[in-house]
Amino acid sequence: MDLQLPIQIDPLPQPIGYPDKIMLTGSCFTEHIGNALSDWKFDTLQNPNGILFDPASVASSITSYMDGRPFEEKDLVYFNELWQSWQHHSQFSRMDKDEALQGINDSLARAHAFLKETKWLIITLGSAFSYRLLPEAPAQFLPGRYNPADAGGAPVANCHRAPGQIFRKHLMTIEEIIVALDTCLYRLFQFNPALRIIFTVSPVRHIRDGVVENNRSKARLIESVHHLVNKFGRLYYFPAYELVIDVLRDYRFYDIDMVHPNYAATQFVLEEFTRHYIGAESQGIMAEVKKIVTARRHKAFQPATQAHKRFLWDHLQKTEDLARRYPFLDLSEELAWFAGAH
């Protein structure tokens, strides 16, 4: 008896491999995939602007990576005792203006260099709702990069708990989503001709928008992405949303908030991603890497015992052997740990 609906996931014509650089950007679900790939020692860079949800913010951030223009003081706003950027997550906010700019520009420089050499860009869209900074907002909230000509207000990536009346909540149309991403994609393929892109739609429910509005939002994202995938030859769609919503299809696979997929659900999605999108040779390497990483995280109750010292020595040898066979793996943390440098 089949207890799940079948789903067709076509393998990539050129699967992801360990030599490939992988950039990930988008919603919080991006980090489930990105953290796993990082743990497995793939060469990744994720969310250089922090978590982003809507297509306008994603397209704007990617464009800024290509431009590489450093942020200046006039591009920040100061409120709630913090220097903040409307284009960045609150993790970049600082009490000191220079520290805020330093963190933002260091991340921008890394993203610019990394994107030039990236083989795979994974974009996870979370919501079609975009927040717009209104032209009539008080001057303290209008940074130098604000363009008052933006129809309906300039999109912001994060509201930073600013007063709600300075924003307009806008449900992007399918046409608006396609135009924002399409323009960005054309520039991306000129910036990095070897780039390939995987789109996903986050299965996290944005329940604050309401159940009906959340479904409208997700539907617009899905339709827009499929339009783009059908238009470009180097775009692919991984059905993370469908795997959780239609295949698992049970609140047992959500956390207590009934909004975020739980560990079992995210592991299921990762297994499907690995099986269909990562090459067979790299999957073999990944299996060895996982054993080393698991051993590195082992917490000894009696670290002074000979048994634990043998454990460290044995895994040091295994890690050194793995590093020799696959020099592209960065196992420096594990090598230092097993050598006793902790």
Image (cartoon, grey):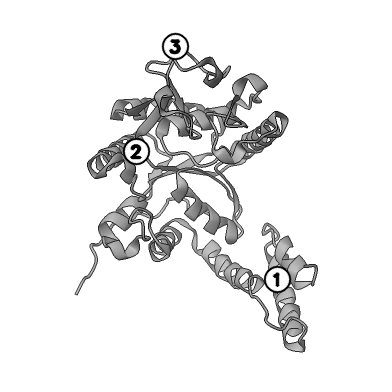
Instruction: Give me the C-alpha separation between circle 1 and circle 3.
Output: 56 Å
Q: Amino acid at mark 1?
A: Thr
Instruction: Report which residue position mark 2 lands on.
Output: 225
Instruction: Give me the C-alpha separation between circle 2 and circle 3.
Output: 27 Å
**Residue 309 position by quadrant:** bottom right
Q: Is residue 162 above or below residue 3?
A: above
Instruction: Report which residue position mark 3 lands on.
Output: 149
- Density class for disc 2 (Cα within 10 Å; few <14, some 14-19, many ≥20) is many
Point out residue 60 in the picture as x, y percentages from the top left corner.
49, 28
Q: Amino acid at mark 2?
A: Val
119 left or right of 59 in image: right
201 left or right of 303 in image: left
Q: Amino acid at mark 3?
A: Ala
Is residue 239 at least partly visible in the picture? no
Q: Nearer the viewer, residue 125 or 165?
A: 165
- Which element type, helix, strand or loop, lies under badge 2? helix
Point out residue 282 in the picture as x, y percentages from the top left corner.
55, 62
Image quadrant occupied by the N terminus:
bottom left
Is residue 295 at least partly visible in the picture? yes
Q: Residue at x 55, y 70 (%)?
A: 287
| Badge number at residue 301 | none
**Residue 236 position by quadrant:** top left
| Badge number at residue 319 | 1
